[in-house]
Image (spheres, rainbow, N blue to C red):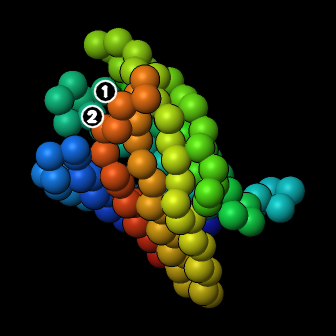
Amino acid sequence: MARKAELSLTGRQRDQDGEESVTESRMTADYYEKEGSSYILYEETQKDSGDIVRSIIKYNGSTLEMTRRGAVRSRMIFQAGQAHRTDYVTPYGTLPLEVATREASFSRKEDRTVIRLEYTLSSGGQFLSHCTMDIVLRFL
């Protein structure tokens, strides 16, 4: 049975010029566990188009997988010390990415889960940005 929760996502990206951008979003999410994995399901509305993107975060042990479907499509895998390839598909085209995860930490308490990801994005062998993502799930 799914539990309702408040989901907070904070992403920081630093590009090759050292310029940093921060994105923050909050939304209601559903959380459930199945076969040893935890799942967070939520929807986001794209600011520029108003399109809805449905996302699933699946994690277990030291691996997190984030799948997005809708106007933007991707399947990113975060596993400390590993690099994974993905295609980031938008209405404007497809960007092949490599996600090299430096850190993936998970902390769970009775009323919340905190996840921190630190990773580098590159495309075609070219560095794009160094990123962190903080995911906080507070159960309602």
The image position of residue 133, as x and y in percent, is: 40, 60
Question: Which residue is found at the position 16% from the left and 53% from the top?
Answer: 18
Residue denoted by label 2: 46
Question: Which residue is found at the position 37% from the left and 60% from the top?
Answer: 132
Residue farthest bottom in this picture: 110
Q: Reply above or below: 67 against 34.
A: above
Q: Reply above or below: 122 against 42.
A: above
Question: Quick one: SS at disc 1?
Answer: loop
Q: Nearer the viewer, residue 138 or 11?
A: 11
Question: Which residue is found at the position 36% from the left and 31% from the top?
Answer: 126
Give the class, few, some or many, for how many residues have Cα within 10 Å of label 1's Cα (few <14, many ≥20): few
Quick check: can you spot residue 17?
A: yes
The image position of residue 66, as x and y in percent, is: 55, 45
Q: Reply above or below: 117 against 98.
A: below
Label 1–label 2 contact, CB within 8 A: yes
Quick check: can you spot residue 66?
A: no
Q: Is residue 135 left or right of residue 109?
A: left
Q: Nearer the viewer, residue 111 or 127?
A: 127
Give the class, few, some or many, for how many residues have Cα within 10 Å of label 2's Cα (few <14, many ≥20): few
Q: Nearer the viewer, residue 124 or 117?
A: 124
Q: Which mark is residue 51?
A: 1
Question: Quick one: SS at disc 2?
Answer: loop
Q: Earlier in the sequence, mark 1 or mark 2?
A: 2
Q: How much space separates mark 1 and mark 2, taking CA atoms?
A: 5 Å
The image position of residue 127, as x and y in percent, is: 34, 38
Residue farthest front in this picture: 125
Q: Which mark is residue 37?
A: none
Q: Is residue 20 left or right of residue 136?
A: left
Q: Is residue 113 left or right of residue 60?
A: left
User: The residue under label 1 is which amino acid type?
Assistant: Asp
Question: Which residue is found at the position 67% from the left and 57% from the top?
Answer: 63
User: The residue under label 2 is which amino acid type?
Assistant: Gln
